[in-house]
Image: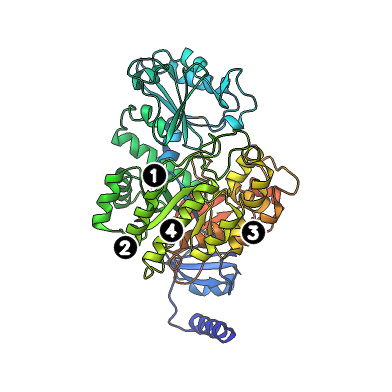
Amino acid sequence: MKNTIFLGFAFFFLFSCSGNKETADKVFVNGFIYTVEDDQPTAEAVAIKDGIILAVGTTEEIEAFVGNETETIDLQGKTMTPGLIESHAHLMGIGYNKLDIDLMYVKTYDELVEKVAEAASKAEPGEWITGRGWHQDKWIEMPNQTVNGFQTHDELSAVTPENPVYLAHASGHASFVNKKAMELAGITPLGSENLKQEVEGGEVIRDEIGNPTGVLVERASGLVSRLIPKDTPERAEKALELALKELAEKGITSFHDAGGNQDLIDLLEKFKAEGKLTARMYVMLSSRIPELIEAWYKKGPKIDPDHMVTVRSIKLNMDGALGPWGAWLLEDYEDKPGSRGHETMPIDLVTQVAEKGLELGFQVNSHAIGDRTNREVLDRYEAAFAKFPEAKDHRFRIEHAQHLHPDDISRFGELGVIAAIQAIHLSSDRPWAIGRLGVKRIKDGAYVWQKLLGSGAVISNGTDAPVEPVDALPSFYASVSRKTLKMTPEGGYEPDQKLTRDQALKSYTLAGAYAEFEEDFKGSIKVGKAADFTVFDQNIMEIPENEILNTKVMMTVVGGKTVFKAE
C-alpha cells in the first residue's frame, strides 16, 4: 500500500511539472476541502476540465493548471465537500408542497384549519384544496375531540362546505379529509347504504358510533386521492422547477427519487434534453403501479451514460409509518395494546420482485420501518439471494430501517443489504417514538446506526422530503448529535449510536453514490470523478456541534457547472 501511494504522488509530481499537463476549465483554490478519500482526506484546491476532476492538491499545485481561459474561483477559506447525495426523498412532492398548502410547520389543529380556510376563501366552489405536512404528534396541543390519537373533521368541514379537502400526513402514510371529500368518495357512517368502509392495507378511522373522523390511514387514502383531478403538464413542470431550485439551494447534486412513475421519468428526460436538469436523478420505480413495473421488466434497466437520469431500481412500500401506528411490529404498540400495525402490500411481493430483480438486473429497495417488516423483508431477500447465487452485486436496500429486532441487525452486513436511513427522523420522532415502542425496543433496535455499521452494512442518508425539508444540514446534525433541532437532550438520545462527522459526511456522499452503483463516478473528490461539489460558509467538520444548524450552503456545482451561488 505504501508503495502504491508513493507511486501515485510521484506520478502527480511528474504530471504537474511536465510541459504536457492539461489546462483546466475551472479551478477552485484557497478552500478547506474534504475529499472523502482515505489516501488524501483534505486538500486546498481542485482543477476540473469538461466536468471531471483533473487534479486535487494545494493551491500552489493547482495553479499550475491555470491557463488563459481558465476560470479561477477563490473559496476564501470556505469548506467544500463532494456534492451531497439525497438518497431517499420524493422529488415532485417537494415541488407540489410549494404549490399546495404547506402544513409542515403547523403547530396546532386550529392553525391547520385557519390555513385551509384562507385557501378556501380564494377557491372556486367545488375546487379541490390540497396540502401536506401535518403531524399530530408534533402539535403543541391537540384539539378537544380526538379519536385513536387523531383529530376529527368537524372544524375543517365547517370552513370548507363547498370544497373537497385532501391533506396528506407528513409521513405520506395517512390523510385528513373533510365532509365534502368523504361524500364524493362514498365514505359514510356505519349502517349507510353503499358503504365504503375498509380497504385492504388501510383503515378509515371512525368514532365510537361509527362516523368517519376524516382520517384515512395508508391505502384508505386512495378512496379520496383518486378523485383529485390529474395535474396539468404545466403544473407538473412548475413543480419540478421549484423542486430542482430547492435542491440546488440546499447543495444537493444527486437525488434518489423513492417511488417515481413514467410521467416523472418522461419529464426528467425532457428537462435533461432542454438543459434544465440541475441535479443527477436516480429513479426508483413505484411498486404501487404494477403495469409500470411490468413494462420495465420487458425493457430492462436504463443506465444513463450521461449519469443524469438512471432507472434501475424498484421501490416496494411494505408497511406504514410509526406516527399513524402503521409500522408493522413483532409485538404490540406500547400505547395501543392489541395493535401491531400492518403490511401495506402482500409480503410475498418482496419475493416476487426480488427474484425478478436479480434475474433482470434491477435493484430492489423496500420501505420497512417496523421490526416485523424489516425481518420479513430480510428473510425474503436472503431466500432470493440463495436462489440466484450468481447475482453478486445486487446492492438491495431497506429504506428507513428504523426499528429493528436485535437479532436482525447483523443481517444487513452479512447479506450486503444497504440501510438507507434518514437521520433527521430521529430528531423529529424520537421524543414521541418511545411512547409507541417503549424503552427496551428504543434502546435495543431503534435508529441503531453504529450497530449497522458494525455489521459491515453501508448506510446512506437522506431526509424523505417532503416528510422533512430537503436540507442535509439538519440531518447531518441529527447524525452526529442525536438531538432534536431544539438541541435537546444534553448528550443526545442513545449517544453510543451517534455517527462521527466523517461517517456522516460519507453517508451523504460516497455511500449515497454506492447505493446507486455510482461510487466510481462520483461521491468523493478524486481525479477522474465528476466535478460535483457543495460549498459551505462554515467548516461543518470542525465547528461546535450546535453551530451546524446555522451553516449555509454558498455554492452548488454539478458537472463543473455552478447551479447555485448564494448572494
Helix, strand or loop under label 3:
helix
- The image quarter containing residue 75 is bottom right
Give residue 106's position: percent from left, percent from top. 57, 28
Q: Are marks 3 and 4 in contact (CB under 8 Å)?
A: no
Quick check: can you spot residue 159?
A: no
Say which of marks 4 and 2 sits in front.
4
Q: Which residue is mark 1?
A: 346
Furthest-front residue in this view: 338
Q: Which residue is mark 4?
A: 381
Distance (Cα) linking label 1 and label 2? 21 Å
Q: Are marks 1 and 4 in contact (CB under 8 Å)?
A: no
Label 1 packing within 10 angstroms: few (<14), some (14-19), many (20+): few
| Side of 481 where 81 appears, left or right | left
Three-letter amino acid code at the position of disc 4: Tyr
Distance (Cα) linking label 3 and label 1? 39 Å
Label 2 packing within 10 angstroms: few (<14), some (14-19), many (20+): some
The numbered mark, 3 or 4, whose residue comes first in the sequence reads 4
Q: Which residue is mark 2?
A: 359
- Residue at image coords 41%, 30%: 221
Say which of marks 1 and 2 sits in front.
1
Kindly identify which numbered label has been placed on residue 501: 3
Q: Are marks 4 and 2 in contact (CB under 8 Å)?
A: no
Helix, strand or loop under label 4:
helix
Distance (Cα) linking label 1 and label 4? 15 Å
- Residue at image coords 45%, 30%: 203
Distance (Cα) linking label 3 and label 4? 31 Å
